[in-house]
Image: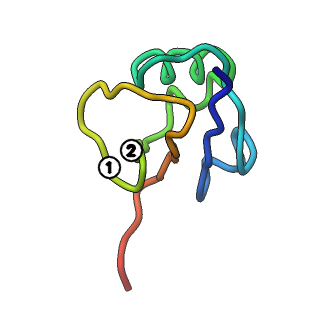
Amino acid sequence: MNMHIILFGRLVDIAGSSVFVKDVADTDSLINALHNTYPALAQAKYVIAVDKQVITSNTLLNEKSVVALLPPFSGG
């Protein structure tokens, strides 16, 4: 499965506005694959959203999942 990941904010400077990751079944394996490919992401702060919902634990993914990495943000 080829998973499309959308990035925002300063994460774009690290990896670009979108990346593709192969053979990930869940968000834990996705994080490992991203950190191996883009080591600077391991030092960055971000949350993961799957299908427009911020997740706080390992979540299963499928080929239709929409995944985004969101950096910290503030209102104003």
Mark 1 falls on what kind of element? strand
Residue under the image location 58 percent in, 16 percent down: 33
Residue under the image location 62 percent in, 22 percent down: 39
| Disc 2 residue crowd, few under 14, some 14–19, many 20+, Cα 10 Å | few
Residue 2 % position (x, y): 68, 25
Q: Please say if 56 is above or below 62.
A: below
Quadrant, the C terminus:
bottom left
Q: Quadrant of residue 50?
A: top left
Q: Contact, CB < 8 Å: mark 1 with mark 2?
A: yes
- Looking at the image, residue 70 sits to the left or right of residue 55; the answer is right
Q: Type of residue at label 1?
A: Val
Residue 3 % position (x, y): 62, 30
Residue under the image location 64 percent in, 20 percent down: 1
User: For this rendering, which residue is in front, 63 or 27?
Assistant: 63
| Disc 1 residue crowd, few under 14, some 14–19, many 20+, Cα 10 Å | some
User: For this rendering, which residue is in front, 38 or 54?
Assistant: 54
Spatial separation of the CA atoms under disc 1 and disc 2: 7 Å
- Looking at the image, residue 10 sits to the left or right of residue 65; the answer is right
Which residue is farthest left?
A: 56
Residue 68 % position (x, y): 52, 47
Mark 2 falls on what kind of element? strand
Report the mark closest to the observer, 1 or 2.
1
Residue under the image location 62 percent in, 48 percent down: 6
Q: Quadrant of residue 55?
A: top left
Q: Type of residue at label 2?
A: Val
Residue 29 % position (x, y): 47, 15
Residue assigned mark 1: 54
Residue assigned mark 2: 47
Number of the label disc, if any, that sits on residue 64 = none
Q: Earlier in the sequence, mark 1 or mark 2?
A: 2
User: For this rendering, which residue is in front, 60 or 75?
Assistant: 60
